[in-house]
Image (tube, helix red, strand yellow):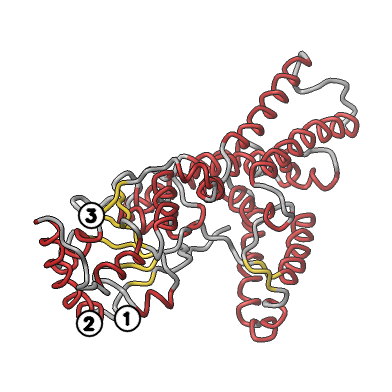
Amino acid sequence: MAPFVPDIIGNELNLIVALLIGIAFGFILEQAGFSSSKKLVGLFYGYDFTVLRVFFTAGVTAMLGIITLSYFRLLDINLIYINPTYIWSAVIGGFIMGLGFVLGGYCPGTSFCGAAIGKIDGMIFIGGGFLGVLLFSEGYPLFENLFKAGFWGSPRIFETIGVSQSLFAFLLTTIAVLAFIITTKIENKVNKRHFSEFQPACIYAGLVILAVIIGLSAFMMPDRQTEILKNSSDVEMLNSFKPAEMSIDEFAFRIIDNDKRLQIFDFRNTEAFAEMSFPNSMNFTFENLFGKDTKRLLTLKKSISVFVADDEETEKRAAYIASGLGYDNILILQGGLSKFKQEIINFSTLQEINSRRDADIYRFREKASKIIPEILLANKNKGVKQKKESKRVLGGC
């Protein structure tokens, strides 16, 4: 699972795509009337709510688009950069911007839209914006404490208010529909119009029903990570899951043979991993499986990916999560590392031999019990610890 850049859209193509999107975005803003300061300030005076409707439409479209792309594993939400929230600078900055919006008739983005078609007031507004940036930059030492006050991290609203992602998406879509209806009635009253923009009324009803259906679609695409993690804790579901296994003897042989194709995903805690880690092993958590780097590792051609943990149940849970994400080339270590330690590392010579196969296993395990501890000692603290959180640190609007 990964963002479009650089996995689908390469870094070289990224700037060209951004330019084309920017041109399209500017065109849409101009067509929506955002190049007119009168239309923009109409929101504050109650005679034109185009700004509110456009921003609600953009927000709902982006929200449902992200949910859909995430559900189909085309987008990793964890890699989307969320600007950190500093509440006091946000409140004060919002007040200043809102005041400038009412007085000047533009916000920073729409001022460029107006300037692009020759609006002098838009050009003046841009100049004021650059002046404001200069003053803030030069006076930053004076504003720094206020700027950094009230740090809230990078919260998501549905987590903050304690509701599910799907419910929040539906509620926001519903609020948007109600806002469209209410603002249209206000516009009609303020402008003394006695007709709706949509005639007949059935068009309104159809659009409302369509918007509600789109909002309900969020329930059909729950947060994939939450859903899979929840299902992986279901004992009955986990018992019915039968992943492929690698025997402890094959695992030991591949370690001794230094098999470069072997990738070991170790789901123990960091302390246990630091104490004993195998060559080509990586310390993982269940959450790591949803990350971008995991996709690259689990889709390597000719690689042999083995999930290990102290017990087989933890391995099965990790394999279930990976299977839910579409990875089908996963093996788990039979019996877990507890069995591997007991029967390979701490091999006992006092074992009954009833067949030639038992004799072969006896000889191999006796040899492995001497070699593998040396390998583990040489590899101590050399394993790779995966970062718990990976974010694309890029700015945003």
The image quadrant that residue 249 belongs to is bottom left
Q: CA distance from mark 1 to mark 2?
A: 9 Å
Say the numbered circle drawn on residue 381: 1
Task: Name the residue: 59% across, 40% down.
Answer: 64
The image quadrant that residue 121 belongs to is bottom right
Query: For numbered disc 1, what is the local secondary structure?
Result: loop
**Label 3 CA crowd tier, 10 Å (few <14, some 14–19, many 20+):** some
Above or below: residue 29 compared with residue 6: above
The C terminus is located in which quarter? Answer: bottom right
Q: Nearer the viewer, residue 78 or 198?
A: 78
Query: For numbered disc 3, what is the local secondary structure?
Result: strand
Q: Which of the two discs, 3 and 1, labels the residue nearer the N terminus? A: 3
Residue type highlighted by circle 3: Ile
For label 3, the residue is: 304
In the image, residue 339 lies at what x, y percent?
33, 64
Residue type highlighted by circle 2: Ala
Say the numbered circle drawn on residue 378: 2
Q: Is residue 30 left or right of residue 175?
A: left
Q: Is residue 395 left or right of residue 87?
A: left
Task: Name the residue: 66% across, 70% down.
Answer: 132
